[in-house]
Amino acid sequence: MKKLAYLEGLRGVAALIVVFHHLVLLFYPVLNYGEENNSISKYISISPLNIFYNGDFAVCLFFVLSGYVLSYKYIFSNHPKILVGYAVKRYFRLMPLIAVSVIFAFILVKLNLINTSVLNSITGSGDWLTDLFKCDTSFITLIKNIFYGVLFLGDNQYNPVVWSMKVEFVGSMLLFTFLLLNHKIKAKWILFIIAFALAFYFKQYYYIAFLLGYGLCYLNKNKLLEVRSTILKLILLVIAVMLSSFPAAWQYWHSSIYSFMHFNAIDLYSFYHVVGSALLLFLIIGHQPSINFFSIKPVLFLGKISFPMYLFHLILLVLITNPLFLVFLPYLGYHFSFLLSVVLTLPIIFIVSHLANRFVDQPALRFANKIENRALGALFKKD
């Protein structure tokens, strides 16, 4: 799987975009939602520049990457038992690190170490900030949340970012089912179109990301992804950026460069991000300089810690960046207080993520692999 290392680097960059997204929501919410009286922030929020902190786009990119990576070994080997093994271990692969992040947040709430009310009165982040980490502090509810609430119900009351873990888990299982059903069908595009149409009809756009990731992997295996025309690549890049940066500031859609993409009858916000993410991945797969960039050591490091960074960053931003900012604010002013707080917090996020990867996520992966091997040994006994 060394050939996929650059995709891990891309995942790390996506995780960093999610960090930037929550920093914007915490300290500069006008960059996300827009504000009529703040023209600079308004126009940034409805421009392609928001791609650098567009959290929904980054999460969609996670899902597309999952579709690609989880399909890769099966597509290149054509052994369906690989899918069975992946399905068996998926829960055990995801749950341990989620559990640690949830328990960490639970303890902080119990100790009353998370307080966002003062920050909200300054930044005006609104209900999103005031509702963070409002949770049931009973031990029984915590246990339920850990073992099935997050992955099966999308319950994110303890750690807000884990809402996406249900999509990741269910999307993975649906992908494995789709691939198994499609295994002996020669015209594989038929079931692909049916699955795509059903997901679109029921507005389950995030699950389309897994299908598109699979589709890119299938096309790559059959050497159908090559685009030689530089002009066509540039056109596709512009389209990908426009789709990926479709803004959250819905009240300004009609007066922005995205107005032609807005339809009153249907909300395509996440669908655009899914398709844009898939297009960007398509372009990166066929572009060696991009592959080289996402393969350099600092980016690969981000990829290595991307899962724990995603799960722990918001907790640490509220726990550390928030009080640091409030301490610095009377002396340094708003913007410099923000920058200094972030500079001091990011290394802590990286260190915590590295430790969580080493002592939780990697052991969880080894444990999940053991379960996979035992399950496959029991299900596919040699004669």
Image: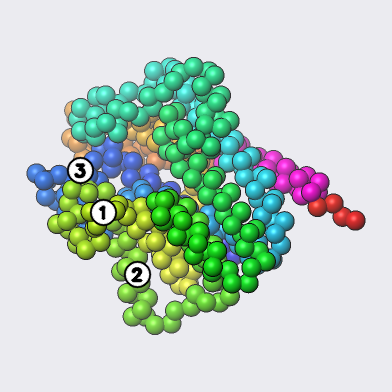
Q: Which x, y percent locates residue 211?
A: 51, 59
Residue 368 inside the magenta-drawn segment: yes
Please tell me which residue is depicted at 25% across the width and 28% down the height of the picture. Answer: 119
**Dots 2, 3 in contact, CB < 8 A:** no
Q: Is residue 309 visible?
A: no
Residue that label 1 marks: 265
Q: Which x, y percent locates residue 310?
A: 45, 42
- Disc 3 from disc 1: Cα separation: 26 Å
Q: Is residue 131 visible?
A: yes
Q: Which circle's residue, 2 or 1, is located before the other in the chain?
A: 2
Q: Seen in the image, is 14 located left or right of residue 144?
A: left
Q: Is residue 154 above or below residue 287?
A: above
Residue that label 2 marks: 237
Q: Secondary structure at mark 2?
A: helix
Range covered by the magenta-colored residues: 357-379
Please tell me which residue is depicted at 72% across the width and 42% down the height of the picture. Answer: 371
Residue that label 3 marks: 30
Q: Secondary structure at mark 1?
A: loop
Q: Which circle's residue, 2 or 3, is located before the other in the chain?
A: 3
Q: Is residue 355 above or below residue 282?
A: above
Q: Is residue 318 above or below residue 232?
A: above
- Residues packed near mark 2 inside 10 Å, few (<14), some (14 to 19) or many (20 plus): some
Mark 2 or mark 1, which is nearer to you?
1
**Amino acid found under the numbered disc labelled 3:** Val
Residue 143 inside the magenta-drawn segment: no
Please tell me which residue is depicted at 59% across the width and 35% down the height of the picture. Answer: 96
Coloured how? rainbow
- Disc 2 from disc 3: Cα separation: 27 Å
Please tell me which residue is depicted at 44% across the width and 39% down the height of the picture. Answer: 163
Q: Secondary structure at mark 3?
A: helix
